[in-house]
Image: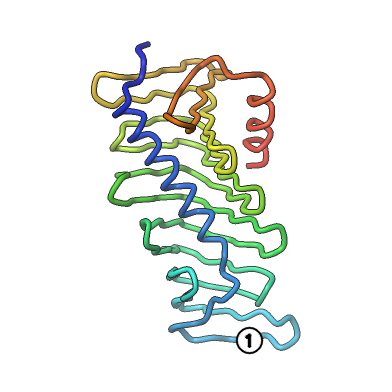
Amino acid sequence: MSGISSSTMKKNALLLLAVSTLALTAGRFSSFSVESGEQELDLGTGVTTMPKGGVLVDNRNGLRLEGSYIQFKQEEFIRARNATLRGSDGNFAATSLEYAFRGEQLRLSGVRYSSSAVKGLTSNSGLGLLAENVVVLKGNVRSQDPQLEANTLVIDTARNQALVLGGFSYKDGQSSFKGQRDDSALLIEFKSRPTATTKVPADVLGRLRSYANKL
């Protein structure tokens, strides 16, 4: 295992911050409206269904959500299948998406993300705990550029920390980190400069691992 260079860590920072910024912004659909798509309103439940899909837009946050099937209830939830969310920082797609207004939770499956800084980032599932400024990606977390393979990634944007859990590998240029055990962990912190260590403080490991267990 070798140390991580400054350029490597800058790219790693872009990866983590781009994903967390988009996911945390994506949850704020307080001002969304329907741009297109046939709507079926259930007067008894207040749930609107778009069985053939459509487009929701949030002009306040510059977001555009497209899905092959969409269901929503104002101030309660949004659900979408084969969803694509487009924002100024990048685009992500998911086979399923559900946002709960209460608790500000965004749940995703089949996550795919791309931007000018990150290429080919995917994971089996994702969870955005928006009120707590935490994003969790779990299951076959992959990125083509930079090269990342991990089981679980927990991002705490409030504390500028990211924790990689389980078997993982990270490679960019001549620098790399690897963990080959189920209890392997890598902590990345963003302060005056990015730093990474496999010697994760017990309190930080316990706190961030608890978020991983929610997904």
127 up-or-down from 175: above or below: below
| The N terminus - image quarter | top left
Q: Quadrant of residue 78?
A: bottom right
Q: Is residue 66 visible?
A: no
Q: Amino acid at mark 1?
A: Leu
**Image position of 192 (left or right of 102):** left
| The C terminus - image quarter | top right
95 up-or-down from 198: above or below: below
Tell me how many marks there are. 1
Q: Using the image as rendered, state which of residue 198 and residue 114 is in the foreground.
A: 198
**Image position of 54 (left or right of 27):** left
Query: Residue 67: x percent and y percent?
Result: 45, 69
Outermost residue, top side: 1
Q: What residue lies at 69% left-to-right and 23% top-to-bottom?
A: 203
Q: Quadrant of residue 134?
A: top right
Q: Is residue 114 visible?
A: yes
Q: Using the image as rendered, state which of residue 13 and residue 185 is in the foreground.
A: 13
Q: What residue lies at 28% left-to-right and 50% top-to-bottom?
A: 116
42 up-or-down from 150: above or below: below
Dot 1, how many residues are within 10 Å of its Cα: few (below 14), some (14-19), or many (20+)? some
105 up-or-down from 137: above or below: below
Badge 1 marks a residue whose secondary structure is strand
